[in-house]
Image (cartoon, rainbow, N blue to C red):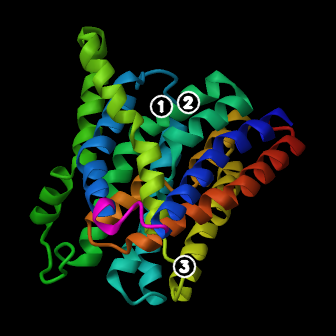
Amino acid sequence: MEALRFSFTAIFPIVILMALGFFLGRIGLIRQQLIDDSTKLLFNVAIPVLVFVDLMESEIGASFDPRLMLFAVLGLLVVALLLRLIVPRFIPEPPAVATFVQGCFRANIIILGIPIISNICGSLAATRLAMVASVIGPLYGIVAVFIFASCMGGGPDGKQRLGPKAILKLIFTNPVVIGCLAGMLASIINLEAYMPHVISETLDELSAMVLPLSLLVQGAGIRFQGEGQCLRRSLAAALIKVLLLPILALLIAWLLGFRGMDLAVLMVLFGAPASVSSFAMAHQMGGDHRMASMIVVFSNVLCIFTIFAFVFFLRLMGQI
């Protein structure tokens, strides 16, 4: 009951903030220009700083389990590749394909996943998830940029195909990827120990703006009227994200011999709702940002029920 109460407490503020953004957008207090400017700020400054700070403060070498790490990394790559090959058979528009695929694999591990797993299984499980997230986090950004680049054929205008060198350049000039790589380097050299307090406080303040601003902007950008197809696609992506993928991940992990806490870590890793940063990525890369925002909405709402169904099942099986 305590885990249920905590998770509702963790998830409901996200839903409320998005609902507030939706309301402010409907009454005209958040206009399209503010949405565009805010997403640029999030994508180019706030989200890279958040990723940098999280990775800098993490102990990448702590609780390293190569088997768990390999499963997580291969799982992400296989999911992204399969979705990239399958989704275009059902969705013809490249921006929608890229947004759908990203919404299916990119999870909100840092903001929601770690607190939830900590409350369910304790600090050791949270450390293991943080260790996996230190590698998966950069991969999310790299794979997402690659997905958008391959779908869009040269970026938002879609006018030219990118070669391998151009794709690599697009990847490594992406602000989120730069933040990931810089954060990993900072963690390795223990930069936090030498950083002046005023700098670390400034970075923390910038990081703190990501969640409320992202959710308000996403809520304000939601348009339900006349978007039945978009709503159906968003719901389908959300169901894949929080229901189908964790079921498959847990089944395969069980067959491979994972037990106990590691199953809970993988459940959160593959079953956490879509990342709030996926909206900014879709907006800046020329994707369907309205679909991205609705995937976040649907996955967060559905996650209220699916995460606890998985927790109940794992407890029933005596794994947590």
Q: Is residue 206 left or right of residue 294?
A: left
Amino acid carrying label 2: it is Arg
Q: Identify the magenta region.
A: 27-34
At 77% across and 51% down in the image, what residue appears?
Answer: 310
Q: Quadrant of residue 189?
A: top left
At 12% across and 81% down in the image, what residue appears?
Answer: 160
**Residue 11 x, y percent position in the rendering:** 65, 47
Residue matched to label 3: 224
Cα separation, mark 1 vs mark 3, equals 38 Å
Residue matched to label 1: 131
The reply to whether dot 1 and dot 2 touch (C-beta < 8 Å) is: yes
Label 1 CA crowd tier, 10 Å (few <14, some 14–19, many 20+): many
The residue lying toward the viewer, choosing from 120 and 77, is 120
Mark yes or no: residue 203 visible: yes
The reply to whether dot 2 and dot 3 touch (C-beta < 8 Å) is: no
Local SS, label 3: loop
**Residue 25 higher or lower than 142, as above or below:** below
**Residue 73 x, y percent position in the rendering:** 45, 48
Q: Which mark is residue 128?
A: 2
**Residue 10 x, y percent position in the rendering:** 65, 40
Label 2 CA crowd tier, 10 Å (few <14, some 14–19, many 20+): many
- Quadrant assignment for the C terminus: top right
